[in-house]
């Protein structure tokens, strides 16, 4: 387990790495260099142990059994909710709704809030850099209701024009749904300003925090966010667990998406009434192990310290941007200044297709993503069909960034 | 698994000097294939005469070396072939890539070089994109009774 460090001391990457079993793996007889963290993060032993302990020692359904195992499972599940709530500084644990991930969280809002509050002629404001999961649910809502989507002006580095944004609000603006950090450009959006401006017009804001919450300290109350969606698996937790945070009043007014067990108060033959938050929005047996694993992941991140995680990634990002921009023929996307961005670096190598770059890097044991990153409208704006993308996390090192730079140079030489 | 299995000399040659690239003016079958996983797109033009012979074939698009070289190889493999022979070549290629069947090497020509892609399972889709698009184009052509066919964004 990692020893807590002060911000001044920085993060002890070697100690962190020792907590992640998979980082000792070899790939194609090379040490694994895992730079695909924006897709999913690796898991520390503490998270793997939490899953195993649940299944081996107290596996039971929650909120049902009167027996000891069920009581413990319920307590651990609810404790995980409380820990996640503290991690993002939610006012109440019941403002944290467990979902399968960011996609389900956003769809929950698009259905449960959107169908009630958005109608024909209404407008939803988005950006062109949204992940498909914060785009397609709103297209579907617009198709159901006759609402329209409008796009907030931004440049190719993902920097939002706040003045133009402020002018977009009108009597029909119902919602702003915007990413907190682009999964392609790494750009961190000015969430506090976006929310403040929206609130001046009484418009709620949904923040897609899938890429930000794993890497930056996020205080949902300080931001004033109305809805925040994120995934457990990108922040050291298991897959299949995510979170919809919502302000109590908004969640209370929402209709459930899933009818079934756990979410009811009284069921009659022809009608039913719903129970209170958070269970109203968590129909069916939830991902109990996943929630407990996410609780362990949050504990791990807090033990290391989120400011330390951010500082470490910032330093690495700056190092990587400098190194890669010096490489001949390498085109970098997103802000050039590491201050405006997280550790997600999209790039193009000469005129070599990103898939070929991905395969050549893989042969060196380096895992990156190559493709459209579920952001096809942004790819069109950038004028490419795909990019290669390296994304960093707390366990990555400068030596791994060096491997990436060497691998890119080899890939370029191979195709010339 | 070595990179040489994937990037054979024949493949790199077709990638660097693609054959039959660009629009075909007298095409009567125009197809677009997309791979939604990676965003690769291929446009395919075919001229099929009244006797059912593919007199011309060309492609354009953007994609990785595997998808582009495979399309180039494919056009060479079907130009001048009667439809039945073209279907046999498609079956050879798809059988080799998707099922691991031994192809008729003479009939398939340079396409044999793509066999190594099987060792890279995530890249198989790159290799078969153009062939699936061709197969769909021939099926659409048959269904249209020889009328001009133009289809956008078919998923392969």
Image (spheres, rainbow, N blue to C red):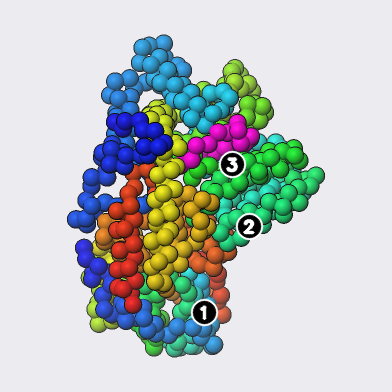
Residue A245 is situated, as x and y percent measured from the top left of the image, at 56, 32
- Which label number is shown at residue A337? none
Please give left or right for residue A307 compared with residue B87 in the image.
right
Task: State the residue at coordinates (43%, 54%).
Answer: A318
**Residue B37 visible:** no
| Residue placed most toward the observer, A50 or B27 | A50
In the rendered view, tell whether residue A116 sits above or below residue B62.
above
Name the residue carrying label 2. Answer: A154
Please rate how many residues cluster around mark 2, counting C-alpha atoms within 10 Å: few if below 14, some from 14 to 19, many from 20: some
Q: Which residues are magenta?
A: A215-230
Name the residue carrying label 3. Answer: A207
Q: Are marks 1 and 3 on the same chain?
A: no
Callout 2: SS: loop
Task: State the residue at coordinates (59%, 17%).
Answer: A266
Please rate how many residues cluster around mark 3, counting C-alpha atoms within 10 Å: few if below 14, some from 14 to 19, many from 20: many
How far apart marks 1 and 3 lie (CA) works out to: 46 Å
Please rate how many residues cluster around mark 1, counting C-alpha atoms within 10 Å: few if below 14, some from 14 to 19, many from 20: many
How far apart marks 2 and 3 lie (CA) works out to: 17 Å
In the rendered view, tell whether residue A27 sits above or below residue A100.
below
Residue A53 is situated, as x and y percent measured from the top left of the image, at 30, 25
């Amino acid at each position: 387990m990692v020893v807590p460090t002060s911000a001044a001391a920085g993060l002890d990457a070697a100690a962190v790495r020792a907590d992640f079993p998979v980082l000792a793996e070899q790939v194609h007889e090379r040490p694994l260099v895992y730079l695909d963290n924006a897709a999913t993060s690796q898991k520390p032993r503490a998270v793997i142990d939490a899953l195993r302990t649940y299944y081996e020692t107290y596996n039971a359904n929650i909120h049902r059994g009167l027996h000891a195992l069920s009581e413990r499972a319920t307590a651990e599940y609810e404790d995980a909710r409380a820990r996640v709530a503290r991690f993002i500084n939610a006012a109440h644990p019941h403002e944290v709704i467990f979902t399968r991930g960011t996609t389900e969280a956003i769809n929950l809002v698009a259905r449960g809030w959107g169908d009630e509050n958005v109608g024909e002629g209404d407008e939803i404001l988005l950006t062109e850099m949204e992940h498909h999961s914060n785009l397609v649910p709103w297209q579907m809502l617009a198709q159901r209701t006759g609402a329209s989507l409008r796009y907030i002006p931004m440049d190719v580095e993902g920097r939002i024009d706040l003045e133009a944004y402020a002018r977009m609000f009108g009597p029909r603006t119902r919602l702003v749904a915007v990413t907190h950090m682009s999964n392609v450009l790494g750009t961190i959006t000015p969430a506090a300003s976006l929310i403040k401006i929206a609130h001046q017009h009484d418009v709620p804001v949904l923040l897609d925090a899938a890429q930000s919450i794993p890497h930056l300290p996020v205080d949902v109350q300080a931001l004033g966010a109305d809805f925040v969606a994120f995934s457990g698996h990108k922040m050291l937790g298991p897959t299949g667990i995510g979170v919809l945070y919502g302000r109590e009043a908004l969640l209370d007014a929402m209709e459930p998406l899933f009818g079934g067990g756990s979410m009811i108060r009284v069921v009659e033959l022809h009608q039913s009434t719903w129970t209170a938050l958070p269970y109203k929005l968590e129909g069916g047996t939830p991902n109990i192990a996943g929630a407990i694993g996410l609780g362990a992941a949050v504990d791990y991140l807090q033990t290391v310290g989120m400011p330390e995680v951010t500082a470490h990634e910032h330093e690495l990002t700056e190092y990587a941007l400098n190194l890669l921009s010096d490489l001949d023929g390498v085109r970098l996307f997103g802000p050039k200044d590491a201050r405006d961005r997280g550790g997600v670096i999209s790039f193009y190598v000469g005129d070599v297709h990103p898939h070929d770059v991905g395969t050549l890097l893989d042969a060196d044991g380096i895992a990156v993503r190559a493709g459209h990153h579920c952001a096809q409208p942004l790819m069109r704006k950038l004028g490419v069909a795909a990019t290669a993308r390296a994304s960093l996390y707390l366990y990555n090192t400068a030596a791994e960034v060096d491997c990436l730079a060497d691998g890119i140079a080899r890939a370029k030489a191979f195709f010339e | 698994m070595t990179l040489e299995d994937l990037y054979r000399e024949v493949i790199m040659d077709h990638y660097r000097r693609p054959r039959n690239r660009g629009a075909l003016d007298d095409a009567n079958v125009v197809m677009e294939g997309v791979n939604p996983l990676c965003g690769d797109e291929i446009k395919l033009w075919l001229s099929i005469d009244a006797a059912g012979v593919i007199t011309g074939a060309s492609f354009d698009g953007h994609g990785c070396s595997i998808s582009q070289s495979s399309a180039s190889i494919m056009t060479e493999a079907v130009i001048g072939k009667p439809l039945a022979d073209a279907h046999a070549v498609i079956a050879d290629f798809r059988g080799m890539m998707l099922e691991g069947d031994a192809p008729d090497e003479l009939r398939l020509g340079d396409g044999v070089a793509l066999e190594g892609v099987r060792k890279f399972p995530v890249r198989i889709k790159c290799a078969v994109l153009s062939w699936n698009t061709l197969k769909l184009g021939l099926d659409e052509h048959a269904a249209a009774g020889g009328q001009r066919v133009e289809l956008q964004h078919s998923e392969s």
